[in-house]
Amino acid sequence: MILTKAQYDEIAQCLVSVPPTRQSLRKLKQRFPSQSQATLLSIFSQEYQKHIKRTHSKHHTSEAIESYYQRYLNGVVKNGAAPVLLELANEVEYAPSLMARIILERFLQEHDETPPSKSVINSMLRDPSQIPDGVLANQVYQCIVNDCCYGPLVDCIKHAIGHEHEVLLRDLLLEKNLSFLDEDQLRAKGYDKTPDFILQVPVAVEGHIIHWIESKASFGDECSHHAYLHDQFWSYWNRFGPGLVIYWYGFIQELDCNRERGILLAACFPTDIITLCHSTA
Amino acid sequence: MVLAHFLGGTVCFGRKMQAGFHNCSPAPSTLSPAGGYRAATARQRPGSSRESMGTARTAGSSRAPPQGAPEDGGGGDSPPWAGARRPRSAGSPGRALSDPPNLSNLEEFPPVGSVPPGPAGTKPSRRINPTPVSEERSLSKPKTCFTSPPISCVPSSQPSALDTSPWGLGLPPGCRSLQEERAMLRKERSKQLQQSPTPTCPTPESGLLLPSRTGSLTVEPADPARVSSRQRLEVVALVYSSCIAENLVPNLFLELFFVLQLLTARRMVAAKDNDLEPSQGTLDSLESPLFQSIHDCVFFAVQVLEHQFQILSYLDKGTLKLLAENERLLCFSPALQGRLRAAYEGSIAKVSLTMPPSAQAVSFQPETDNRANFSSDRAFHTFKKQRDVFYEVLREWEDHHEEPGWDFEKGLGSRIRAMMSQLSAACSHSHFVRLFQKQLLQMYQSPGGAGGPVLGEASDVLNMLGADKLGRLRRLQERLAAPPSSGGPCPPPTFPGYQGFFKDFILSASSFQFNQHLMDSLSLKIQELNGLPLPQHEPADEDGESDVDWQGERRQFAMVLLSLRLLAKFLGFVAFLPYRGPEPPQSRELQDSIVALRSQVPPVLDVRTLLQRGLQAQRAVLTVPWLVEFLSFADYIVPLLDYYRSIFTLLLHLYRSLVLSREGEGEMCFLNKLLLLAVLGWLFQIPTVPEDFFFLEECQVDALEVDTATSERGLDSVPVVDQQLLYTCCPYIGELRKLLASWVSGSSGRSGGFVRKITPTTTTSLGAQLPPSGHGLQAQLAQAFFHNQPPSLRRTVEFVAERIGSNCVKHIKATLVADLVHQAESLIQEQRMTQSQEVGDPAQLLEILCSQLCPHGAQALTQGREFCQRKSPGAVRALLPEETPAAVLSSAENIAVGLATEKACAWLSANITALIRREVKAAVSRILRGQGPEPAARGERRGCSRACEHHAPLPSHLISEIKDVLSLAVGPRDPDEGVSPEHLEQLLGQLHQMLQCRQFLCPPAEQYLAKCSVELASLLVADQIPILGPCASHRLERGEARRLLLMLLSLWKDDFQGPVPLQLLLSPRNVGLLADTRPREWDLLLFLLRELVEKGLMDRMEIETCLGSLHEALWPEDFSEELETLTRLFLAELHLPEPQQRACELVQPSRGTVLAQS
């Protein structure tokens, strides 16, 4: 699961301009049978997000929005049951869920006096039954269930995965008899930055002392790792000293370069934990 | 001065040295104006006794000014600080002295200790005079090269890539620019000569002999039999030694250094160098030079060393060894050698090598760092970001500061200023300053520590065991490649290592507010540490106070002293920063006006009072070393101000009074004295201290003695200083060893560089504070009790009281206050129940709750007292020696209980109400925000049986599986795509398992699963799920569909704990799915509705409403009709005994009826 930069690049290479659909995922799995599905999905999702970040703005010009909306209208007039919106998104290489949002926003603008609030839109995306237009509701729903990188369902899955791994990590810590403070407890004490777990007694992993453990249920690629370093890991170091990050879906080997500095990477719960021995003498 | 007349008048080597030292500078651009200035002024007073005294000159010249020295730990490219002197560049000899200094000009104001790039891009070497030796004359008439390597032979015979001068400073290989430098020097000198109105002495005649220490010259053997004028040398040595012994020389160690230079001179070389300082004038007074041969030099040196044996015996073991092994010394005085060897063998003064400090962040402490300590959310979050930026900058500095070409200001300046500009509120400034100061102290207090006291020393072992040794290797390499050099026996104040970062940070931040807050904070901390009641050691305890205690006390003293010095250095740096100029004011008028202006500025910290108190309390050994650090950053005007002048006078008196040979009752310990002499001597050599100060100041030693004689035994008479501390505070003393080592190695090599650093000490707090004193007789009795007990007893009791008191408060928070918060929570819940979810105005609610709960806070005092009573005695007992007499033990316990109770109750009575309020308020807002109770309380819902091994599939997996089914159902899909009925059944089975286990389930996931399951039901009802398998129609069998629906119903009824959005089943969108099927089949929907009612998942009214609103939507006409029928049927069923039968008559009875029974 720990990939070299070269291995990672090979996978990333295959993901250029691939729409985020079930079919694409299936093909990817066939192409790299030795990699775990979760790792592939995580890499796919991150690569796709990078692609979206890069192209996001061009889909949000008023011209683009207008043209998408017209195409949508023309499409559903011809056949409301056809996957108009989904195909439009795939054609312009944009995430179906995000395309659905654009069209929904545009639609509501046309039908309401005031521009729709973000929370209304989010709520409609979560539950398309609330969309006043039945055809649009179906189109939006179709986009959301067919998008494997964006949308409320995907967000929920990601959140669930993150939570599950935190629980998993908690259980492992309990099993190893390592006492810790979790995020909720830390927040209650007023900590301004909170890793998933702070060890009440530090331990050594592979010869490095760690004070905290952060669980990341994703693949650690360069982009996300650097963002995490900046926003989280160094902040933890600044407050609690060195610590361990577990990328459950693996990471790029070359990123594990801050061990001496106090950020240790792992792809699973460490096996060789050395704890402080209480002298019995 | 006597000696100076004597030496200076007699010999010319002093003059030579002066010339050599004074006028030398490695690179023209780094030519020290300090040296230059001194030389010039000295020359103006040819009658001055110091003028010609070789050693004093050595001192004056060999110490570098606060700039131009290459050994700034922070690296050579740090940003300018205004205090640096202006280099008198040879390229600008005509610079008008009245030019206003341009403080932002990097060239004009290079950073202290850093070396600005020379015009030729050469690496600056150092300020020692590099006098070339002409090779053809090296034997007959060698040239002066007293303390520097011969230049012309550098490329051929110098094996080391770097300079190997005894000064330990780097000289680049080849010294290609030396000729250039010499030329510059000549220009510079002629400029100085022009400025100097007094005619200087003519050049000495060639052939005059000078001692040389240069490594490449063959060593001339020294022979006691060939000493030229033994008697004269003996007398001079005696007088000279007396001056040293009576502290009549400004710097004891400089004199020792000089003497060791004489001892290790390689041979005499003839002085002929046009550059040399002319010294004819002084030569006239006596006929012959004092030192006519190498034998004279060595003889004199050994004579002096004999007189100074006592000091030598206190040097570190390494130096003693080198001295004892010196063959010349053995040859000239076997007796001295014997004493030295004995001293070496008896010495335990090993100065240890320890790891360099590593960066450890200041840990986050909720008590001082959480939101409650900030005025607003914004301030809190701003500080959060600042902490991160600060460490980001620190890390970047760590990575880059040693890279050539990296510039602090360029690399980090703008980021630092951007961060500082966000510190708008005064409160944020104080937070940041606290972080800054703590980090500064921490860098030097917890080497290798793992952030907390927990692992401490084990970490090194673990590091060694660890797989990754690269870092250690790198560090080792760094150390070997760049041993910290102290830069001669009198280096300028520098900021080595991490200190450089903090210095440059202050400069780059250039924030007035920050500096002010920093000074406030540093001053406070200095006063706090300076006033710390350091235990007085009773050296002559009968049972011998255990060594452990003794070590601990020394360690504590060392840590306090080193912390103080660090803080004072930075305080001095920041406080005098605005006033530091490149050179002293040129005209008397200007100087007077500045002095008048500055006289009315109050000192940043009343150091005079602190010094006076320190002297009175006999705590000079603690106060003076940090005061010296502080004063070393003073600007030129400071010594002229009455306030500071009196301090300098006081220090001078102290210096004179510290006669090392004087011993006895009430005297300061030898090493304590030696430390003070070393730091004061160093201070007197700082360029900003007027050079005539030492000699002109009236000395009234008596006054000082009167002051101190009255007070009782203080810290000064306790042997708190050891060699480790002495060498840590004064690394330049190590130059003696380097000098001797270079003699041994045959070349004045880089002598390894002794890495010294603060002794690792415990990372616990700096000793206990004095507890608030109790009342009346009881308090006096308690004090008296401690008086005759070992100090460790007092420390233990105070420590226990402090900790138990603090723990008591924490305990009350966790028990009493937490209980009250629970009560508040249940009160709110009750209110919600009774008033149907309506909770009134939160503020009002809070008031009601607090009025009910706060009175309970009174219990805190009772409980607190109980707690202290219960906990303190055990702790005291555990910490005191087993053998403590019972009476002493019980008194100690009682005092601890009393102090702890006092502390805890004082806090509780003042704060308990506010604390309860705060906690209840947090609980109220938590509940109102709908977060529910504390995570601990939430745990109840979670939870499968204990036996559960949590093997159920993960929620995320199920959501994505269901999502796949949904996406298949709504399409688009390939013709071969679909799901098998078995898969669907399995999926629902897994969902059931998972909902039973719940181990990994979080509320949002459950919510989505509920929603997805409803959508799945709608798709089942509308027969929209593409089925794989033999059934050609790709449609699900009715029976299968019903079975799945029943599974779903059971999930909704029994497994989901959150709300399930069942009304979605009757949303227009989901019912509309039926509209697309041909023929429409309503039986499943009716079946579902019936089951919902039967299982109590929805009531009839609710369904009726939903069905009613369905009619409002626009439907195809036939669909509306069928919907109408369904509604009627459903409603009719309500009143019929056998609803199932009736319902199935609606559509296709042939298919539905039978299966419905199954």
Image (tube, helix red, strand yellow):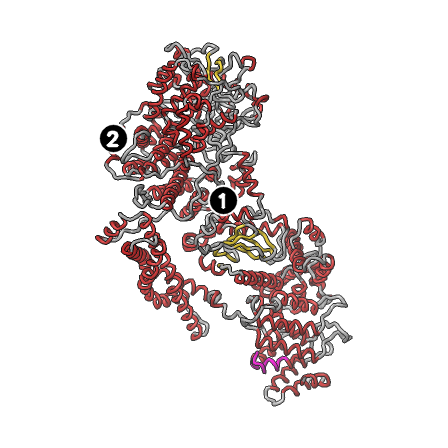
> Badge 2: how crowded within 10 Å, few (<14), some, or many (20+)?
few
Identify the residue shown where x is 38% and y is 15%. Answer: B230
In the picture as drawn, the residue positioned furthest to the bottom comes out as B1137
Could you tell which of marks 1 and 2 lies nearer the N-terminus?
A: 1
In the rendered image, which quarter is residue B891 located in?
A: bottom left
Q: CA distance from mark 1 to mark 2?
A: 47 Å
Label 1 belongs to which residue?
B359
Residue B813 spot, x, y in % from top left: 38, 61
The chain that hosts pointer 1 is B
Q: Quadrant of the C terminus of chain B?
A: bottom right
> Badge 1: how crowded within 10 Å, few (<14), some, or many (20+)?
many
Task: Classify A175 as above or below B203.
Answer: below
Residue B252 spot, x, y in % from top left: 37, 27
Residue B515 spot, x, y in % from top left: 41, 40
Q: Is residue B1058 left or right of residue B644?
A: right
The disc label shown at residue B703, or none: 2
- Is residue B349 inside the magenta stretch? no
Q: Amino acid at mark 2?
A: Ala
Q: Is residue B266 left or right of residue B774?
A: right
In the rendered image, which quarter is residue B1107 located in?
A: bottom right
Contact flag, marks 1 and 2 (Cβ < 8 Å) = no
SS for tag 2? helix
Task: In this rendered view, identify the residue nearer to me: B567 or B377.
Answer: B567
Task: Classify B826 as above or below B490.
Answer: below
The disc label shown at residue A26, or none: none
The chain that hosts pointer 2 is B
Residue A168 spot, x, y in % from top left: 57, 62
Task: In this rendered view, identify the residue nearer to me: B730 or B626.
Answer: B730
Q: Which residues are magenta?
A: B1088-1101
